[in-house]
Amino acid sequence: MKQVIQLDADGYFVGLTTADESPLEPGVFLIPAGAIDAPTPNVPEGQRAKWNGQWVFEDIPQPEPEPEPPEPTPEEKAEALRMEKQYAYQTESDPLFFKWQRGEATEQAWLDKVAEIKARYPEAQ
């Protein structure tokens, strides 16, 4: 086995990999695809190494900033509120309704919770 240099598709240093000796030709090493038999580069801080017949060092490019998400449309805002209201009914008032049906809560507790949700989301349909 022999350590060789692994490059990415653009020729940049990725790391070390292993070349195995050929079982048919002793002393000949089978270099993996995208790898080269060259000295390991001593990459300066903040740079990357590219093989171009020799090592060339260049600054690591800064990633593009993530774009700001677009402002939701009025329709999207209304749909989000409608879904929040529906979720509130499912998680807050529906359990009280079923407790009332089983005699574990009062009808008024359920009605108060429904009124509270309606007041919290007046514009949601």
Image (cartoon, rainbow, N blue to C red):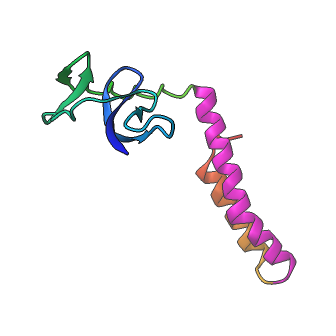
Please indicate, yes or no, whether residue 102 appears anywhere in the rendered image: yes
Majority secondary structure of the magenta segment?
helix
Is 94 left or right of 71, judged from the image as shown? right
Frontmost residue, 90 versus 8: 8
Residue furthest left in the image? 44
Q: Is residue 65 above or below residue 52?
A: below
Judge left or right: residue 12 versus residue 102: left
Point 61% across, 31% down: residue:
76
Magenta span has 82? yes
Q: Which residue is painted at 34% across and 22% down in the image?
A: 11
Which quadrant holds the C terminus? top right
Q: Which residues are magenta?
A: 74-103
Q: Quadrant of the N terminus?
A: top left
Q: Residue at x 37, y 41 (%)?
A: 17
- Which quarter of the figure has residue 6? top left
Q: What is the tally of numbered marks visible in this picture?
A: 0
Q: Is residue 50 magenta?
A: no
